[in-house]
Image (cartoon, rainbow, N blue to C red):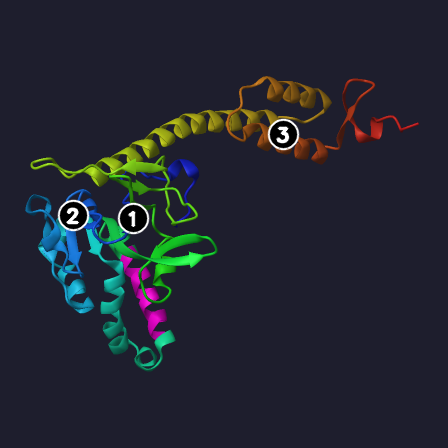
Amino acid sequence: MAVKKPNELDFSNKKFMMIISGQPGLGKTTLALSAPNPFLFDTDNGIARVKAEHRCVTSATSSYEELLEDMESAEYKSADTAVIDTGGTLVQLMKEWAKKEDIKAAKDGRAMYGVIKTEFDRLCWHIRNHDKKHLVVVFHTTEQVKGDTIQTRLSCEGSTKDIVWTPADFGGHMLMMGNKRMIGFTPTEEYFAKGCFGISGLMQVPELKDGQPNTFLTNLFQAAQANIDTEMSVYSTERKAYESAMECGKHAIEAVAGPEDAASAKAMLAGMEHALTSKAELGAMFKARIKSLGLKWDKEAGRYVLLDDAKPAE
């Protein structure tokens, strides 16, 4: 079964997906390669523009079939992060593949982009869940005018640019603010972005000096994982208190057989220490138990009585 209780969910070694967007020349590829132990699918032939000391094992793929083949290589399998640079060019490579895979896609552009959308989604899922790797997808951006605002959007054909945001944990938009390179994780009127696990707002991307390690995304992923672990630790403590309260409360409620038991159980439930939703849940269980036994609270008498013994309202 795939069903799990909240306390059974395990996020201790989460594999993150991140989108990096921005105009050319901002250093998106170098930033992407700062992820843990990366393997680069260089669909844009951009690795030459990365300083030699920051390069990694690279697939200079010229077709989608070649990309899939390189995913079987020992070099890819030993990596911790898959980097696709760029997502827009990958969609271009997928067009020829889609025409071969689907007869309708070869004749109908709409059908072709539907096939590409499905395959792009499958690829992202496979890298994260089957291959157990982080995934970073780089996109160039285009500008469009909306009212008085110039908005930037992912440069990508078809509807793929819309679905990539859904599975992504982070969407970082790179931009220049003065002479500083920044990356934003909070959406604005000008650009879309996405943050979670305590990662939000604007961060400065450092200019790397010779010999300086390229670790920005490695550090960011570690910070996000630490935030997840802290939250789960706090929740685990609360969950244990909740389970203890529920067990104790259920025993008291199940033991109610008459008016005196009901009064004792009510007092115990009111005085015990609750956690999470235990107070509301046990309160509902207690009311159901009282109703099933035909008991009612008599305000004048200040105790529970059988419904047959309750005084009629005057």
- The picture places residue 117, in percent across and down from the top left corner, at 34, 65
Q: Which mark is residue 17?
A: 1
Element at label 2: strand
Question: Do tag 1 and tag 3 residues touch (Cβ < 8 Å)?
Answer: no
**Disc 1 residue type?**
Met
Sequence-earlier tag: 1 or 2: 1
- Tell me, yes or no, whether the highlighted magenta stretch contains residue 133: no
Q: Which residues are magenta?
A: 111-124
Seen at 16% across and 47% down, the residue is 38
Front residue (pair 179, 303): 179
Sequence-earlier tag: 2 or 3: 2
Q: Which mark is residue 38?
A: 2
CA distance separating discs 1 and 2: 13 Å
- The picture places residue 45, in percent across and down from the top left corner, at 14, 60
Marks counted in the figure total 3
Q: Which mark is residue 175?
A: none
Seen at 30% across and 77% down, the residue is 102
Sequence-earlier tag: 1 or 3: 1
